[in-house]
């Protein structure tokens, strides 16, 4: 992991990290160490990465090797149960707020696909179209439409339809899912959500009552069509692992607090850093600022032009914040090549232009592969992924 | 401990017995079952587990509309007039290892059913579409009588049909015609007058399990059960699981291609192509191939899913049309 520097001491809460806002203190970098301490999760050390390699019999995903997924809660317990031959399932999600997906959005999905393939476990993907309706003031119809559009990009990441259930809140809420939402809601006071999410009395009640919606996919009984047996009984002991960006931690802190009180297992988490905006480290790539992001629909020329924004940055060839190298550390799979580039560039033997050229190559390949995959995602395929159906081979 | 539905279906596939499987809500009676599969034009079965006064058991599989008179059957078996009763519920679990409402000839695959006698209605003979529960009553499978015969043979039983509705006089001059169906206490010899395929029970005093393990049909089942490394003894893994494993398939395709390239090359050249070349190529294209293969899998599933939805729509339309 490149940045281990602790930022200058200031107030505890001067960097803001929650599901709706991410800004660093004083326009600096996000201090991940402080965040881990503040949130109370654990660092994902090299020993865990090695254990994953051993258990899955394959090299760890590039995001694990480079510390992109750097924090966790009880991931070791998931590995323990997997080693014993027990099962778990994956849960991740997206708030469909824009039609265009950028690379930052894809990161949890790329990683989740790897987890699905490596551990051979099922996955539920939640599209929070209701949340975006409330927070972004989009109409219900638009929200639902965006959810389906985003589902295409998600499917294009290469998920296995025989192990994956995608659902949108507007379509799926009800039944056992809703029963669990009420159970969770009964355990969380208004004061608590104010404390966790920063709600105020002026916030409308839709927002305030939303958190249970994102909490309950962690419980297998929310998905009887997947996890109930012939006698309609769900194994409540089935654990859930949630790959997500660290700004989602508050939802699951709340969930983990509530779970034992309603007789359920606490979900485990594996959390990532933010994908740096093209302008620098102070925030995360945001869909609302097109120049901060590289979109999956960008052509190689677009990518090249966006990179030139880098020219205008005041900071020099500082490896720690240098965007092209940073991006390469996310997406260049070859460890040896990355080390080589870092050395050559740091010592001045390699020029910025060369590094950027390699980056453009890597990114273009990624974007191109995604585009090819997406072209093969039809309406019928989206329907199949989103159908409420059993997945008989989900653990095979 | 008993076979599961999945294990049974795997076994049928292994034996290359064609069947069609229909899932439905749990049913406990033939009437309820008929609601879900009755319209498919096959023969529904009613299956009884019977017990005599000497605690010997009989499975009777009859056509749903065959009249089975227990008093007549009892006499034909030589058990006297009231010798035959419906077996108590706990025997279903103990002997056949199936739940209530689920008596089925397939339960005879279990070792616990080794001494159970089996009577098969001759109405099933040469039928293409016979409905039975495959060890669980939320599913019905339809198979031909020859398929059922093949199954029975595979578990060491000689399939023989009985006219269950016949009412021959039983008396001094007419010995009970089904007497051979009464279990004699030696497993494998109780099916019919004709001997079952050679079983070699060395000594009658041996426990049934040991004897069963030497019989041809059962040996393979037992061996597979013991060699399983997973907790649940599986006779085979569903072949579709491997066939749809994207990473495995890509690896196999690549290996095949690489070895073909090598052979072609060696036809005109002395030296082999370096394996490092293939490794490099593999590294380059594996991800793309895997993605493409996953798209293919997802597309095929989606097309199948569409077809399934349409099929249900059509079936429902037909149902309402008929009623």
Image (cartoon, coloured by chain):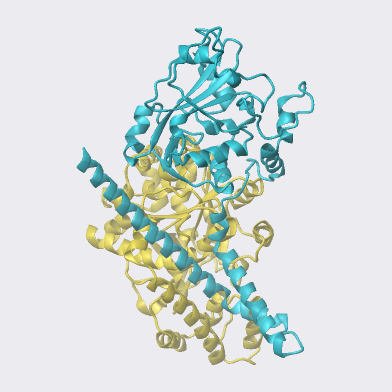
Chain colours: A yellow, B cyan
Looking at the image, the residue that sits furthest to the right is B202
Nearest to the observer: residue A86 or residue A198: A86
In this image, A107 relative to A97: left or right?
Answer: right
In this image, A140 relative to A209: left or right?
Answer: left
- Residue B26, can we see it? no
List x then y, in percent, for residue A121: 54, 53
Quarter in which the N terminus of chain B is drawn: top right
Looking at the image, the residue that sits furthest to the front is B173
Check the image and report above or below for A366 versus B31. below
List x then y, in percent, for residue B23: 41, 41
List x then y, in percent, for residue A385: 39, 57
In this image, A292 relative to B234: left or right?
Answer: left
Check the image and report above or below for B242 versus B108. below
Which residue appears at 40% of the width and 85% of the height? A302
Nearest to the observer: residue A192 or residue A185: A185
Which residue appears at 56% of the width and 91% of the height? A354
Check the image and report above or below for A344 versus A29. below
Quarter in which the C terminus of chain B is drawn: top left
Q: Quadrant of residue B316?
A: top left
- Residue A74, can we see it? yes
Check the image and report above or below for B150 versus A242. above
List x then y, in percent, for residue A106: 45, 68
Which residue appears at 39% of the width and 60% of the height? B302
């Amino acid at each position: 992991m490149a940045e281990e520097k602790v930022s200058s001491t200031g107030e505890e809460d001067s960097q803001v990290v929650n599901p709706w806002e991410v800004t660093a203190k004083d326009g600096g970098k996000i201090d991940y160490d402080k965040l881990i301490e503040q949130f109370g999760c654990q660092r994902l050390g090299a020993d865990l990465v090695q254990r994953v390699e051993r258990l899955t019999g394959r090299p760890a995903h590039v995001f694990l090797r480079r510390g992109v997924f750097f924090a966790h809660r009880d991931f070791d317990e998931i590995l323990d149960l997997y080693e014993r031959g027990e099962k778990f399932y994956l849960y991740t999600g997206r708030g469909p707020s824009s039609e265009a997906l950028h690379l930052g959005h894809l990161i949890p999905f790329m990683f989740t696909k790897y987890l699905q393939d490596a551990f051979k476990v099922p996955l539920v993907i939640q599209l929070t179209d209701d949340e975006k309706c409330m927070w972004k003031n989009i109409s219900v119809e638009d929200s639902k439409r965006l959810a389906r559009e985003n589902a295409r990009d998600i499917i294009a990441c290469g998920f296995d339809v025989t192990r994956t259930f995608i659902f949108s809140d507007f379509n799926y809420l009800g039944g056992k899912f809703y029963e669990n939402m009420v159970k969770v809601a009964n355990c969380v006071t208004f004061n608590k959500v104010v404390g966790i999410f920063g709600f105020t009395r002026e916030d409308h009640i839709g927002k305030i009552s939303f958190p249970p919606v994102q909490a309950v996919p962690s419980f297998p009984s929310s998905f009887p069509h997947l996890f109930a047996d012939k006698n309609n009984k769900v194994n409540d002991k089935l654990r859930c692992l949630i790959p997500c960006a660290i700004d989602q931690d508050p939802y699951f802190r709340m969930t983990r607090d509530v779970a034992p009180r309603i007789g359920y297992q606490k979900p485990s988490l594996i959390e990532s850093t933010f994908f740096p905006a093209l302008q620098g480290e102070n925030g995360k790539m945001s869909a609302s600022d097109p120049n901060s992001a590289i979109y999956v629909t960008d052509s190689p020329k677009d990518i090249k032009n966006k990179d030139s924004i880098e020219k205008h940055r005041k900071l020099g060839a500082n490896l720690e914040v240098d965007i092209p190298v940073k991006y390469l550390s996310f997406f260049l799979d070859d460890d040896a090549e990355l080390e080589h580039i870092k050395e050559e560039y740091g010592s001045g033997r390699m020029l910025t232009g060369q590094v950027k050229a390699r980056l453009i190559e890597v990114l273009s390949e990624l974007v191109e592969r995604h585009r090819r995959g997406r072209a093969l995602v039809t309406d019928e395929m989206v329907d199949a992924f989103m159908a409420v159906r059993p997945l008989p081979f989900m653990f095979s | 401990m008993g076979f599961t539905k999945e294990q049974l279906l795997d076994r049928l596939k292994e034996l290359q017995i064609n069947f069609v499987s229909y899932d439905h809500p749990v049913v406990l009676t033939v009437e309820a079952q008929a609601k879900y599969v009755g319209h498919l034009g096959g023969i529904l079965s009613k299956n009884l587990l019977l017990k005599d006064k000497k605690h010997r058991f009989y499975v009777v599989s009859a056509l749903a509309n065959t009249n089975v008179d227990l008093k007549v059957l009892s006499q034909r078996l030589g058990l006297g007039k009231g010798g035959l009763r419906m077996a108590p519920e706990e025997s279903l679990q103990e002997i056949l290892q199936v739940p209530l409402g689920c008596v089925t000839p397939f339960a005879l695959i279990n070792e616990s059913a080794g001494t159970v006698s089996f009577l098969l209605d001759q109405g099933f003979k040469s039928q293409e579409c016979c409905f039975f529960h495959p060890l669980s009553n939320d599913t019905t499978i339809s198979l031909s009588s020859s398929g059922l015969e093949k199954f029975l043979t595979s578990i060491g039983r000689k399939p023989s049909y009985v006219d269950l509705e016949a009412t021959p006089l039983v008396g001094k001059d007419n010995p009970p015609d089904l007497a051979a169906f009464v279990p004699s206490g030696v497993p494998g010899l109780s099916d019919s007058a004709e001997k079952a395929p050679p079983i070699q029970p060395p000594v009658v005093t041996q426990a049934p399990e040991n004897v069963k393990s030497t019989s041809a049909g059962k040996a393979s089942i037992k061996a597979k059960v013991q060699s399983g490394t997973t907790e649940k003894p599986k006779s085979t893994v569903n072949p579709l699981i491997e066939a749809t494993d994207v990473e495995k398939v890509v690896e196999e395709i690549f290996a095949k291609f690489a070895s073909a390239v090598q052979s072609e090359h060696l036809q005109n050249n002395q030296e082999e192509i370096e394996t490092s070349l293939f490794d490099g190529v593999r590294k380059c294209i594996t991800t793309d191939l895997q993605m493409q293969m996953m798209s293919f899998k997802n597309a095929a599933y989606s097309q199948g899913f569409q077809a399934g939805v349409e099929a249900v729509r059509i079936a429902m339309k037909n149902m309402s049309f008929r009623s």
